[in-house]
Structure formats: C-alpha cells, structure tokens
Amino acid sequence: MLAASCCDRRMCVCPGPRRIAIPVRSSRLPLLSDAMPAPAHLFPLIRNCEISRICSTVCYCHHKHLCCLSSHFAHSHFRYAPQKKFAALCRPKENFNHFIHVRDYASTPQRFYLTPPQVNSILKANEYSFKVPEFDGKNVSSVLGFDSNQLPANAPIEDRRSAATCLQTRGMLLGVFDGHAGCACAQAVSERLFYYIAVSLLPHETLLEIENAVESGRALLPILQWHKHPNDYFSKEASKLYFNSLRTYWQELIDLNSGETTDVKEALINAFKRLDNDISLEAQVGDPNSFLNYLVLRVAFSGATACVAHVDGVNLHIANTGDSRAMLGVQEEDGSWSAVNLSYDHNAQNEHEVERVKMEHPKSEEKSLVKQDRLLGLLMPFRAFGDVKFKWSIELQKRVVESGPDQLNDNEYTKFIPPNYHTPPYLTAEPEVIHHKLRPQDKFLVLATDGLWETMHRQDVARIVGEYLTGVHHQQPIAVGGYKVTLGQMHGLLTERRARISSVFEDQNAATHLIRHAVGNNEFGTVDHERLSKMLSLPEELARMYRDDITIIVVQFNSHVIGACQNEEL
Amino acid sequence: MFLRLLSDVRWRAANPKWRRMTCSWRSTSSTAEPHPVSLPAQAQVVICGGGIMGTSVAYHLSKMGWTDIVLLEQGRLAAGTTRFCAGIVSAARHVSIELKMADYSNKLYQQLEQETGVKTGYMKTGSISLAQTQDRLISLKRIASSLNVMGIPCEIITPKQVAQLHPLINIHDLVGAMYVPEDALVSSANVSLALATAASRNGVQIHERTSVSHVSVQKGCVTGVETDRGPIQCQYFVNCAGQWAYELGHSGEETVNIPLHACEHFYLLTHPLKEPLASNLPTIVDPDGRIYIRNWQGGILSGGFEKNPKPLFTEGRNQLEIQNLQEDWDHFEPLLSALLRRMPDLEALQIMQLVNCPESFTPDMRCIMGESPTVRGYFVLAGMNSAGISYGGGAGKYLAEWMVNGYPSENVWPLDLKRFGTLQSSRTFLRHRVMEVMPLMCDLKVPRWDFQTGRQLRTSPLYDRLDAQGARWMEKHGFERVKYFVPPGKDLLDLDQSKTFYKPDWFDIVGSEVKCCKEAVCVIDMSSFTKFEISSTGDQALESLQYLFSNDLDVPVGHVVHTGMLNEKGGYENDCSIARLSKRSFFMISPTDQQVHCWAWLKNRLPDDSNLTMEDVTWKYTALNLIGPRAVDVLSELSYAPITPEHFPSLFCKEMSVGYANGIRVMSITHTGEPGFMLYIPIEYALHVYNEVMNMGQKYGIRNAGYYALRSLRIEKFFAFWGQDLDAFTTPMECGREFQVKLEKGMQFVGQEALLEQKQNGVYKRFTMFILEDHDTDMDLWPWWGEPIFRNGRYVGKTTSSAYSYTLERHVCLGFVQHFDEKTGEELVVTTDFINQGEYEIDIAGQRFQAKAKLYPFSSLFTHRRRKDEVELSGYQRE
C-alpha cells in the first residue's frame, strides 16, 4: 500500500507541492547492498520529493535483515489517504523513531527462506493450462493450447487475464490487462472486452438471431467459451448492466448493417473504443443501485491497458492499448530461438506515440504534455481504458464526483484534476492492431504485462519458453552413426540428458516457468533459488517495490496445422 | 545395408530350382524392370501381405490342398515388421490358445529348413523368464503349470541356476526364474521366405510390389480385389496387412473393422563381445525390467516394452515411412538402464544400432483372426502384439483350417475378430488403448484386471446414480458394469496396489452383497446383455429359430426358454434365454460379447425373407436383476399384477407396469439360480423404475450389488457362462444340459446329429464342479481359471472359472474333465463313474489343492427354496 499510494510507478497523484511521482525503483533494486542509511543522514533528506526514496530504502533494509516482516512495520501513517501521508511526512521525528526501531531488529539478523515446495506453491497458485481438445486423435486448430499464470505484487493484484474461444465465429481470444489506480477497470475490461470483440466479429444474421432470442426470451446462443482459472471471477452484480450495454451495441451494429464481411482489425478497434465509451457513459449516467453506482465510477476512474490476441487459423491479430506486450517466439532453421514483437508499447519511449499525443493537442501544451516520461507528468501508459480523469472535461469530472457517492467524494485522487489540463481528452483506448500470418516456424506467442518485460529481454523470453516448450523433443537427438559408442557411454550420456530435462520440467506450465526466471534469474540468466525465495518472501507491502504484478499467457501453436493451411493457400 | 542384416540373402542362390518356379517373384524383385508377369484375372483366394502371417496362411492353405491362391505384397516379401522382428519363438504365454499356437510354430519352424531348403536360422536356445518379485514368480509358475501339462518342458529354477545357464546375468535382485528349454530363435524374415518358398512350390502365386487398393463386395460376400496392377476376382480375401490392416479394412465400400494400432518399438543391436556370445545361449526375458535380451551374431539384441509407448500412424501413412523411423535414444534410456542392470558387463560393448520397428497392438492384447462379421469370405489375421513370429505358424494353421473346413481345430474365440464391434474402431480409442496395452506386455497379469483407457463408452442410464453410490466399474465390450459397491466410509486400495493373486480387498464387500442376495433382495444393473428381437408375419420366426436352437421354442406365449445356439458339431456358438413374446415374436438375451458374433451367425443363417425381421434392441432396454427371496415382495408392491409363484412361475415373461412405467418386461429368471426377476425396462423409464424399486425395497433391506456377487452366486450353483466355460467345442451333453435340448422336437435342428451321436456314444469331456478342500482363503493363492486338474495324480483337464462361495465358505472351480488312456494318451469316454471315482487336485501356480468333484449342484444350498426355482433347477436333477 505504501508503494501503491505514494509512488505508483505509473501514476502519482499525491497532492503535495510538486505532485510528481518519483519512480522509486529502477528496474531492480540491489537486493544485497549493505548500505544502511544512518539516521543522521535522514533529516536533510526529508523533502517531499525525496521521501519516497527513503521509504523504499528503509523498507529494503528491513527486508534485508528480516525478510519475514510483520505488517505493523507498514506504518499506519503511510497507508492511508495521501493527505494523511503528507502529514506524516511532516513529522520526521516519528519516522526517525521508526528507523531506530528497525535498527534494533537489524542487530539480530535472521535469515528466512522459503523452501522450494513453498516457492512452488506460491508460483503455481494462479497457474492455468488449457489444451485445445483433440478430436479423433487430431487437433485441427492452429492453437495447441495455452498456459497462463500471474504473480501478484500489488495486493490485491491489479493485473487481469482472459481467454476464450469464439463459438459463433472461428478463433480464440487471449488477453492480458494491467490495471492502475485499482483493479476495477482491469476487472471490467477482462470481463467485457471479449464480448465486444466477439459481437463485432459476428455476421449480421447471427446478430439478428441473438437479438431475436433476447427479444422473445429464448435461450441465447453462447458467444464465448471461457477458459478461466478459479480465481478469475466475474462480477455477478454488474452482469445485467454490462449485458444491456452490450445489447445496445449489437443493436446498433444490426442497424448499421453494412453488408460487408467483418474485418478483424476493424472489429478489434471498434470493440476497444466502444467498450471504453460504454465505461465512460455508464459512469456519467450512474445507476440507481448504490453498489453498482460506486462500481461503475471506480471502473471509470481507474485505468487499464489491454493486449489482446485473436488467433484464427494462420491469422493472428494483436490489438494493443498501453504498455503490455505481445511477442512471437520463432524457431530458426538451426533450432535457435528469436523474438518478434507484435505490439508497440504506448509510452514515452515510443517516439511515434509521443508524436501522436503532441499532434492531438495545441502547440502551447507541447511542454506539459509529457513530463518525466509520463502523460501530463502522471500516467505512464499513453493509451488506456477508463482513466476518465484524462478524458473528461473538468466540468464533467466535477459534476460526476460531486453527485457521486460519498466514498468517491472523499477520495482525494478522484477529486484531483491533472495539471495543465486544457484540451481533453488526453487519453484514448483505441488499440494499435498488428496482423501476422502464422508460419510453421512461429511456435508460440507470449502476452505479458510490463511486469515481465521490465525484468527480462524478449530475446531471453523467447529462448526460455522455446527451450521449455520443445523440451526433450527438440533437444538434438542422439544418433550413433558410424561412431564407436559403448553401452556404458551411451547410458551415461542419456542419464545426464534426463537429469537436465527433469529440472526443466519442474514446471508443468510455461508461464510459471517464465515467472520463475523473471523473478529468480541471477546475472547469469539461470534461476537462483535463494534470490527467488527472497523475492517471494517479501510481504505484500514491499513486493510492489521490487517487482510489478506479472501476468503471462503463453500460446502454443500447432505447426502441423499451420503448415497444412499454408500449403492449402499456396 | 542393415536392411538385410537380419535375413540371410544367400538362400536364393542356394535354391535355383525354386527361383525358376517363381519367376514372377524374382523378376518383380528387381526394381527397374516393369512387371513382366501379369496378375491372374481370378483366383480362389487372394492374400494381402507378404509378412510372416500372409506367407503362413498361404503355406497352410496350400498344404491343405487349396492352391489357387495369389499372395500380394506391396513392397517386398518379409520387408515390414516381419523383417525387423527380434525372432524369438517362445511358448511362455498366458492364454492357452496362444500357447498352443506358439508351440505349433516352434515345431513348424524346426523342420522348415529341412522341408524347404531355406536357411531359417532356427536355433533351439531356450528362454529364461526372470522374476524380481514374488508376485512375478507366481505368475511364471502359473505359466509353467500350463506348459507342463501341455507336454512342453519347463521348470522353475533358482537364481543360481540362472547364473549357470547364462554367464552375464546379474542375479542379485532375482527371486527365481522360469526356464523353457525348447524355446528358439529364428531369422524371422527367412522363416517367412521359407514359408513362401514352400507355398510357391505348392502352386501359390506370389506378386511383390503390388498393393491392394480395396476389396470388392457384393451382397455381403467378397467378389474380388482391386490392385494397382488391375483387379483379381476371388472368393476369399485374407487381410494380413499387419499394421495397415485397419486402413485396408476401411478402404472398401463395405467397412471391415480391424481394431489395431501401431506403436514404435525399439531394440538395440551391438557389435560382438570380445569373446563372442555362443549362439545357443538362452534368451532372457526380464519383465520387471521390461526388456528381452537374445544373443545376436556374437553380440546381443535387446529391446523392451516401455511405460510410455509412442503410438504412430494414427492417421494412416505410407509404408515407406517405416524405413525412415528415427532412433530415439532418450526414449530408450529406461530400457538401456534395465539392460545394464541385468548385464553390467555389457558396459564396454559397442553399439551397432538402435532399431525402430513399429509393432501393431490390439485393444485386449490378443491377436485378431477370423472372418469379418459383415463380409463373408473376408478373413483377417493381424494385430500380433509383437509376438508375430511366435504365433505365425499356429495362427496361419488355424486360419487355413477355418477357411477350408469352416472352423478351426481349436477354440479361437479369444482371438476371434467378432469379439470386437465397431465401437472399438475409433482411432482415438485405439490410440489411447494401445498406449495402455503395450506397457501391459510386461506388467504383471493378475486376475480381474480392467483396462483403464477407452472407458465410459457405453453406459446404462443409471450409471451416474450407481457411481454416486460407490460403484466400482469394469468394462465388457465397451459397456461399463458394476463390480461391487464400496460402502460409504470404506476405502479400497489404489488400483496398482490392489493387484494380487491372493485374497482381494473387496472380499468382505462382495460377501455382504452375496448375503443380501441370499437373505433379502439386491438389484444388479445388467443392461450390457445383448438383446435381439426376432419376429415375423407368419410362422417364419418360430420355424427358423426351431432350426437354429436346440431347445423347443414352440412353447406357450409368455414362457422363457434357456437354449444353446449350436453349430454342426453340437458346440455352443451362443447360450441364451429366449422369451416368446407372442406367437410370432421372440426376445433373445445373450452374453454381452455376443453382440457381433451372434448377429453375424443369425444373419448368415436366417432365411432371406422380408417377412422375418431381426432387430438389435440392446440399447433400448435397461435390465435390472432383482435377486433374492424378497424380490417377489418388492415387485408385488410396485405392480397390481399378481406375481405370486402361482401366477408367475419360474421361466415366465410378462409385460406389466412397474410404478408409473408401463411396458416393462418382467421375467422370472436371474441368471444365477437364485429366486428373483429380470426387469427389461425401456431406457426412458430406467431411472424411475430404479428409484421406485429402491424406495419400495427399503423395508425389505434392498441394496445394490455388482457382477462379482453375481459371479460367486452362479458358480456355486454350477451355472456355466458362455465365453468363460462354454465355447464352440462344448456340447450341451458335456456340460449336463441335456435338458435344454429337445432331440425329438419334431424337426431337425443344427447340431442334432452330433448330439444324438454323443447321446449314444457318450462324451469325451465333462463339465465338473470342484470344491477346494484344503485351501486357506486367507493365506493361499486363489484359483483364477486355466488351472490344471489332476485326477489320481494324472492331468485330466483345466478349470474354466472359479469363485469363492460365501455359502460353502470354500472356493469353487468349474472345469472340464477328460479321460486320457494311460498308455496311448488317447481320449476315452468320460462316464459318471469316472468322475465320481477319482481323487482330484487343482494345481494353482505349482501348488496342488485337494478338490471334491461334483456333477450336480448342491441342493442343500437352497434354503429359501420356492416353487419357481424348483422349476428352474429341476432340469439339473433330471439327468
């Protein structure tokens, strides 16, 4: 909470004098540094802009000496609303006492490690695998199946994932969603977006059929078959509301009947924009039910990025909004692995994106648009769902907040208007869509939130997943050929190979395997158990400083089917 | 180069005479030339497949006088699985018919070289099967018992003796072994070529590089084959296409289902040892290590059956791909470890090659032979489960007899193609099942083993209800049947741990089910039984059935008749109960696995008359068996129809309402000899009737029971079951069922003559019941079936089934007793006196237990005797 409220890497809205977030964490803090801040150094440092850095250092030190941290450390003053926190910052003495307190502990260092089974149970808690069912010994889908997993850093986790098979059209949808300022928006998008996409893809007749079924109260054709982990929940309360919005959408599609066959790219863009629009509208209209009313407001005021893949035969479409990423794992002819990006990050590192934002606003705002690599100096992703603070006019924001429930009104964050806010909207949910025709050498697709990408290079990801998925099968097979090999030599060789493989197969899930590497990799690129154990032992309050939520979906392709499709097309 | 390693190419040069005779073969062997010898336009028999099976069938047919035969091979003779085969001929088999085939093959191969002049590489080395565990040793002892009574030398030896027989073996982890000195090694390809040579001399035409595209069928009979070199007209077609047999069966318009699937099979060849191994060194089989090891050109050949087999050709492929299969050392690693553990001295031995040779496997680990149930004249011999060379000779002989005489000289039902239906022909099913079957080759074979894959295919509508009540399931012909019900709160062992030759963990559970059947009432779901309805507009149905069945079916409407469906020799092709529903329609109930066989038998023999219809209604009815003295009370409460014995005597059938459901066929039979009823319920009412029966039965102490209870009940009552005790070589006279035959029913019936002759001359075997006397149920090995029976110390026959009788508190074995002349071994007539005046022993894995022989069931068992079961049982007392 400490980290999340005062120094969310994505967005800081502490209403302090400078209201600027200082990204606390470089991509990785040195875990084993011996630096221990002396109390004497602290006073000069207590300036509002520096405070978060101190906090993080403190936390880090504490962690070093006592990994098993009791929750009381997460100082109550730090945990609550920004206002109070700021007040706390002005009372250095209290903080100082606190540090002293920490030092007492430090004098009796204890080492605490999770055992490998404990580590595994943490890593595997959210893992999910889906295999496309074989029919009569054959799988005619270009997708063999997928593995997904997520590792929380925030509590509760702000990432979401979804996967579903389109039942009325062909194809499979997979997506990762990275929420910020809470998980409400990511949750809503993860529940709703695929329905919008599926509806956008439906032919006119099917839409009519569905509408008629709803009209006459008949059973609805199922649109999606979800592949969900038990922890991936759907909100029961809002389903009616969501359904009505969706229905309005397809009714409009029916009226608009263009008669043309649906283009996937267009459908994806329309679905993204439409859903974001609906989120915004629902918050403006409100709901008589006070729970729902609060929910739609939370959804609209929080934000989420989305990276969605649609696979249909050899056609792979990636629609991306924000800074999650899609990457294709390609096996070269020599068996090595390479990575192909199938999405562009929408953030300050993307020149085109900065260009786009600048184009959309008057020249006068050029300087204030992007500051500290953030949109308006606040938001890291340049595209997102929700985040009406960056979309609505000031008047609308004020009106909605004032007429909204008290919880909303009391929330400093929602009240706060971004600085230099002149020509909204500054933010869009429109995705960039990339189409890729799958080739037999395209073995897998990795969709992941930035929690993964900031710890690992895509080339490493491709290699680790590739080697994991192919496992023993593509380990260079042994052939005796004309060489003189004895049974004993062969036996030794085989035993060694098996030992190597069994360590890889500790994970049954490619996503879990990747997370293990992302969190536990040492400088040599191999998993260091000690490091892994330490990282996972971090208490909720601290985890966020060392890593972000990580959500990964690894989709495995069926090269045989893809090859066959290709041949047919030729 | 390796392609010819296992076969000796020189034989052709050594036989110039033969070469001249089979010029067609020789010339087609050279690749470049066009085929100079055209195919004949017609032949009596066309055999597809030039492996060990095809050549063996051709050899035996030609020996029996059929010479108008064409053998077609798509590649070259003996070039498929046969060429790669390890060449071990071993009689150590579990199933007695397989054992007989292997024994015959061995004798055939031994004299083949002399007969044909073709070197077969035959070498009598003997084989040693090792046991690492006591259970394995028991399993070997059981085989040893049956080998010994067959006259095949065999002994159980100690690890020390093993070391004396084979110098390289590590014996430290062994508990014993079985030595079969007559087992042999051959070059399988050369055996096949030798058989081809002999067949060719007898006039069989052999054409290589000719593939059959499909078989033409008209009116359900084979008329010819289409090949890539033109058509051949023929009366008989024999599918010996090995792993391509499935595809070939599916290629024609009329599908012939041959359920088999190939798996990759690996074996290792090494260079010779420094001191080359003697060529007469025994073959080692180490089932616990999953490997076999034979000597090969001074080195060794070792392969095995891994736990994780690799099925292939699921989608069907070209044969050429056989040549290109990859060696997979990683896959072979466990087997290599087992090999080095067994023979540590081989570490320094140099590898020559790892051979990948696909083998075909069947859903039940037994090979497939016989005539297609759908196409007459279409014969099959395939699916050898990697024992093709052991079975080749015998299997070819039986199939040839079958084709020439109409039936083979032994009971081959366990191998009959008709034991399978279309339901076993799903490629997915086969793929999954063979992955289970291949490891089973080496697994311990224990009683009551059920396959775990391909399950829940056919189920009764009550499946979920029964499952929720603790049912444990077994499968017969794809149908799930309840073994027993595990009471709540009671746990049984895991499947793997429950494997035992001793008292099983369900002993008490089944005991209480049996007790309930005896004292109160039980329900058993028996929906799997095959059910046919035969009806006609006039008297055709009655007339046809009177001819096909031995008992008199001209009974009043509403009567049920137990009768055999006999063949010309008087043997049981089927054993069934037939209810006369009306003047012109009959309802026939037969065992579950008769669905295909009985249908084909009747279809082929019923007159082609549109006024006579036969329908398979198996799926239309759920059958509940209400067993026990209170069954009548339960049924009385559920129906207004009077069912007291006066109104509803035994062997009656009435259509009535039960609960709300109407049209339930109630029959006063139970298939066990206990009082009770069979309820044949249209499936949509099944749940309703079941619920009503269970609710109403509560006050009578009703409970669910399974087949194990049923089995115990029927065996202690001396009820024979077809497929287990009865087969096509058993007549009603031989099993005390003369009362089910009406020799003078006023018209001829199939098998009548044979039965009359038997009645006059006596029988040569007699179905007998044995009560084990000095057998300790808790401590001793349990009987299973196939145990040798000794009378006054001399072998007289084998058991066919056994069960623990909870009433007698003794084991009961059923089996056949024969009478062999002490000097000549000639079979003599078995008289009642012969049975009664002997001291009997049953041999269970080498240990003999005293047994009391009985020709009639105990009458004192029937404490709750009612009028109706007196009627049902009176037949037994009549003789």
Image (cartoon, coloured by chain):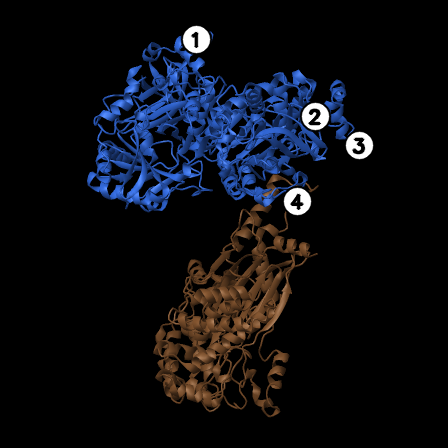
Chain colours: A brown, B blue
Q: CA distance from mark 3 to mark 4?
A: 35 Å
Q: Do the residues at pointers 2 and 1 share their chain? A: yes
Please tell me whether mark 3 sits on a helix, a strand or a loop. Answer: loop
Q: Which residue is mark 1?
A: B821
The kind of residue tagged 2 is Ile
Q: Residues within 10 Å of mark 1 (few under 14, many from 20)?
A: few
Pick whichever of labels 3 and 1 is earlier in the sequence. Answer: 3
Q: Quadrant of the C terminus of chain B?
A: top left
The relative height of residue A24 versus residue A264 in the rendered view (above or below) is below
Residue that mark 3 sits on: B33
Q: Are marks 4 and 1 on the same chain?
A: no
| Residue B707 rendering spot, x and y as whole percentages | 34, 34
The quarter of the picture where residue B66 lies is: top right
Within 10 Å of disc 2 (Cα), the crowding (few <14, some 14-19, many 20+) is many
Q: For the residue marked with disc 4, what is the amino acid? A: Ala
Q: Of the residues tagged 4 and 2, which is closer to the observer?
A: 2
| Quarter occupied by residue B119 | top right
In the rendered structure, the residue with mark 2 lies on which chain?
B
Q: Chain of mark 4?
A: A
Q: Hey, what amino acid is under mark 1? A: Asp
Camera-side mark, 3 or 1: 3
Residue B856's mark? none
Q: Is residue A380 visible?
A: yes
Looking at the image, tell me whether mark 2 or mark 1 is earlier in sequence order: 2
Q: Relative to residue B627, is residue B620 drawn left or right?
A: right
Which residue is labeled 4 in the image?
Answer: A479
Dot 2 corresponds to which residue? B206
Residue pushed farthest front?
A: B538
In the depicted structure, whether residue A158 falls above or below residue B561 = below
